[in-house]
Amino acid sequence: MSKTIFSTWRDEFVDNRYLSGNTCQVSSFKLPRDYSVDKKSKAFIGWDGVAIFDEDVDVVRLACEYAAQYQKYSEACGRCAPGRWGGRILYDLLDKIARGEGSQADIEHLKEVSETMMITSKCEIGRTTPKPILDLIEHYREEFDILIEKQIPSKDYTNEDINYIAKVTAPCMDMCPAHVDIPAYIEGVRDMQFDKSLQSTRQTMPLAHTCGRVCPHPCEDACRRANLDEPISIMELKRIGADFETDHSLPWQHPKEPQPFRNDGKKVAIIGAGPAGLTAAYYLALEGIKVDIFEELPVLGGEVAVGVPEYRMPIEKYNKDIQLVTSMEAVDVYTNTRVDAAKLKELDSEYDATLLAFGTRLSKKVRAENERLDMEGYWGAIAMLDKVNLWHKYRIGSPVSEDLKDKVVVCVGGGFTSMDVVRCAVREGAKKVIMLYRRDEKTIIRNTTYEEYHEAVEEGVEFIFHSAVERIFDEDNKLKKLLINRFELVPSPQGGRAELVKIEGGDFEIECDYLIPAVSQSADLTLLPKEWDIELTSWGTLQTNGKDYMTSRPGLFAAGDCEYGPMTIVNAVGQAKRAASVISRYIYSGTISLNDDEIMEDHLRELNVYDKNEKITGWMQEQPREQSKKLSVAQRVDNNKEVNLGFSGEEALAEAQRCMRCYYISMAVV
């Protein structure tokens, strides 16, 4: 809850200018009253209104600076006359008033131009920018009138001690853990400028081939297009630029020119070469900072390489993302290198900062009676997927079909790992594949994606919901069958989450050859020296504040699964990108800091950019979402060919045209 002097945010009107004490209203929104731990915000202005926190704020200059930010954007865009020329007029008129040369006619002109922009601009940034300006003119009119009547400049017109910190966002960008500039890369596809599309993606997401294929696309849950018809196929449009780079053998499309290798003695160690480790290495290397990556496995890529199956993520595509990172002059990698406590202490003393990005590779138990790791037929999900992928991708080991062909396989879980297990088991020739899950179909889709679940069903996987293993039966240490409990969801009397209640007499047995637990994974923390006494979360992961990603030990950072627990690739990338940014300053200053862009990211996430109740109005017509071509079940069920073939050129252009380019401008005054 945020106390404010005045606010019009999202149509909630708060006016405490003439009130005091307990009579003051409180905003229901998490407005950024505190900009950072040591700075207060004077005001916040954005697409959905304005909030004033300091009575002394210069509201005329606030409106002027906000218009200036939009003018910069509209000049660069120039895609519609109302947006481009309207932006220039808004700023010119407000600046004229702020410097003491305005007239009442300028106020009327401002209103007229604002209303025209809100009706006729082609994209949201042109439609929404005038709203808070009109709010200020309406509710702080006297401050505008005084400057006009007395022909004097606004009180802070030349005050350089006040900072106006702006950030452009969009609902999809805000929801993306890596804050990818989604409208920009979609625009690149629409304009057939695929190199620019990829460069936009790589501003915050280096693994474009990968996240264009296996991302759970939370951004699509915040796509404003869904308020009209269906969300944009954001994930699949991401791979277009990456595939174009690869298919046409282009030089690496970096988001900016990489800085020359500094070779100044500063260096960073990264433990783990999965998505988090690769991402951090890439953005540090872009700044010319020396990075050494230490990886226990014989291959690079972490769990995406040895855990995500070939039919979802072809290794030659992932290898392109990996090569993007390893091609950087400042990056060196060391595979087959296990970092234990002694090695970590050595690295800690030799490097200016260390990032732990080693993931979670220990499969957790299902907590059934007679559950033993040494039982024949009991096979942890990580070990099973390691064997599958090391063979199919690298020809290391032996085929899993030798183990699973004509066998009955039961997997327990409800996430991506369990989905990979069951779909791989089908491809390895299992006679029957069953997934047991404690929750329901809707939850498993939310945990993964509709596409992943639907394709598994098509391939013959049997899903048994509201179930759990009570006991494992074996003969001579060889698994034979499982006793399964049935549950039902009983609504909570308090209105909270429904409770799972065992159905008495609902137990049944499943005869099977393999039980593969995929309920979750944990991190192997034996590499942490005990004397460091590193703080951990209640989940047994490394404790950070979730903003700068430094652990309780100065100079030791953590990102990805080992910090948060098993997460998605895009979450790991988002954390690692932020960690790399913090580390790049820390190794030179010795202090932890966030830049303004990162601080604003956190504020916007708290504020919740997407409004699911918004009604879309205007010239935009409903248009169905394009569906990419998939291999049929017969074409894919017995092999590891990529299932999702992606869009054709025509389909990609048509889908990109559906994007409403929902940029918003926000600005804090500090």
Image (tube, rainbow, N blue to C red):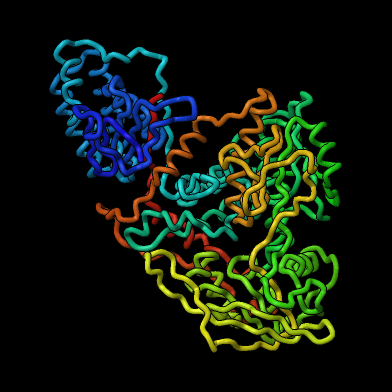
Q: How far across and down, in percent of the image, does residue 663 sit?
A: 39, 43
- Tell me which residue sits at (67%, 37%) in the image: 552
Front-lying residue, 476 or 457: 476
Dividing the picture into quadrants, the one containing residue 83 is top left
* Residue 666, picture quadrant: top left
Q: Residue at x 85, y 42 (%)?
A: 343
Of 400 and 471, which appears nearest the observer? 471
In-front residue for pair 263/570:
570
* Image-based side of 626 in relation to 535, left or right: left
Looking at the picture, does residue 634 appear above or below residue 600? Answer: below
Left of 505 or right of it: where is 281? right
List x then y, in percent, for residue 231. Answer: 41, 59
How many numbered marks appear?
A: 0
The spot of residue 325 in percent (x, y) is 71, 44
Q: Residue 418 versus residue 153: which sits nearer the camera?
A: 418
In the displayed structure, would residue 398 be above or below residue 231? below
State the image coordinates of residue 76 (x, y, percent, origin top left).
41, 34
Q: Identify the residue at horizontal 76%, vertical 27% (top origin).
A: 266
Indicate whether 78 appears above or below 539.
above
User: Which quadrant would the C terminus be assigned to in this image?
Assistant: top left
Residue under the point 52% across and 66% down: 449
Q: Quadrant of residue 281?
A: top right
- Residue 309 in view: yes
* The N terminus - image quarter: top left
Inspect this view and state whether residue 243 appears. Answer: no
